[in-house]
Amino acid sequence: MSIRVRFAPSPTGYLHVGGARTALFNWLFARKHHGAFILRIEDTDEARNTEAARNAIFDGLRWLGIDWDEGPEAGGDCGPYFQSQRQAIYDRYLDTLTAAGRTYTEENGAVRFKFSRTPITVPDLVCGDVEFAATEEPDMTLRRPDGSYIFHFVNVVDDIEMGITHVFRGEDHLSNTWKHIDLFEAFGKNPPTYAHIPLILNPGGSKMSKRDEGAAVASYEQDGYLPQAVFNYLCLLGWTPRAETEKLDPNTLIQLFDTREIHSGNARFDAAKLKWLNAHYLRELSPEAMLAAARPFLDRAGLIIDDEANAAAAIYSVREKVHLLTEFPEWVHYFFRDDFPMEADCLAKLQSKPENAALLEAAITAFAALPDTFTEDQAHEALNTAAAAQSVKPGALMPLLRAAFSGQNRGPGVTTIAHFLGKQKVLSRLTAAQTLLK
RNA sequence: GACCCCUUCGUCUAGCGGUUAGGACACAUCCCUUUCACGGAUGCGACACGGGUUCGAUUCCCGUAGGGGUCGCCA
């Protein structure tokens, strides 16, 4: 029998990071075993079923690179894949349950399921056999008075109808799974194989809620994370791939995925580690890809790009200093604008010694002698020339040039900056720096 | 309250009876670099507690404590 798994989110308006990780594990399992990954929208709650809420799910999954074989937009033989459109199927299933004498109707019209009230064991790939004593809970509601159905019922019916073989879901469902098994048995069906995966906790140690930073998948894009980093990091929460490194691409993750290695304890979300991973993924982008990724953030900072190639190269030059895409503007703004701020400690450096005036003057002379377009090597020669003229080491000149060029005391090498700036701006900025001297 | 899951450095974790308890992130120091980073090296730092079982427990069992979750006509 071929593997069939599903991710069955409810449209709540955003894709929760825990949901994304659940989708991820289902997806990895399906891909590993060449099975089918199905997306099913559990939108039985009419009020929440908005297009925006559905799109949040689709967008989030797509951003992460999780594709589905069956489901909305993908089609498939078991549709429709919106529970709101499957009423007739549920009615039919309810009839069989009623025919078997397993339901009863309340005065107000609600239909309840008669629990078998026997001990039920949940065999779980992660938690082992989890035993539940015969329940003393009230019988569970299957259908509301208005005819709409309850999660437990539709979830089980659809898993039967869609031929689901394995269910990876959050551990928060474990305590209810005996109800599902009770239903499967009432239908005369074998339940799927369950794997309840640990929850993702916030740094405080409780379940990630909407308010927690990083709870919404969409927020990662906003905050400057790369999807491949988030994808990778999410895999590390609740699972330890057997590999030399923790930085692993999707294909490798698929090969490595092994349910026996899934943890049973919850894990806290650690933004610092995600950031670290993100920095590594960022660095391996091509200059063009890096510019494309950074672009929205540069735009937002009001930086105008007129020379694509130069901009890409400039951004690439600070790749090892940036952890998040949001950090690019502060590292490269002076490449794109002349009215950049002069940081205080930078200004102090400029004004620190009386001989700085002569050093700047020598630099202007040396750079003025350069051709209109010059290489980084030529910039270096100009630097050496200026230093020699003043009988100082080139290193003594660097902080001054850096301050004049960028207004900050960090960044790429000064000759790199000079090269990207070009002769005109180099000279104008050195001249401007002279006016700041006292 | 009942039931379920869990418990190794601050965080994520390796460990599946005998280890100097390993790694990653974070942090600190040093090296590299006349910037900031990157990189390299070193350091800091953990088996929740109490009983068993055993020649020997981080590892197996029980209890306690702690954390998380579930008990809806939400999903």
Image (spheres, rainbow, N blue to C red):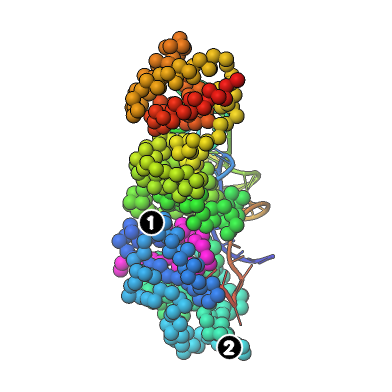
Left or right, residue A253 beside residue A435: left
Q: Residue at x 37, y 20 (%)?
A: A369
| Chain identity of mark 1 | A
Q: Which residues are magenta?
A: A1-24
Left or right, residue A19 beside residue B47: left
Which residue does the numbered mark 1 point to in the structure image?
Answer: A65
SS state under label 1: loop
| Chain identity of mark 2 | A
In the rendered structure, does residue A247 fall within the stretch colored magenta? no
| Amino acid type at image mark 2 | Gly
Q: Does the rendering let one see residue A25?
A: no
In the rendered structure, does residue A21 fall within the stretch colored magenta? yes
Task: Give above or below for A353 relative to A94.
Answer: above
Q: Are marks 2 and 1 in contact (CB under 8 Å)?
A: no
Q: Earlier in the sequence, mark 2 or mark 1?
A: 1
Task: In the displayed orientation, state which residue is furthest to the top.
Answer: A391
Q: Give the x, y percent position of residue A43.
A: 49, 73
Q: Nearer the viewer, residue A345 or A46?
A: A345
| Amino acid type at image mark 1 | Gly
Task: Give above or below for A393 relative to A249.
Answer: above
Which residue does the numbered mark 2 point to in the structure image?
Answer: A109
Q: Nearer the viewer, residue A84 or A360?
A: A360
Q: Does the rendering let one see residue A342?
A: yes
SS state under label 2: loop
Q: Give the x, y percent position of residue A366.
A: 40, 19
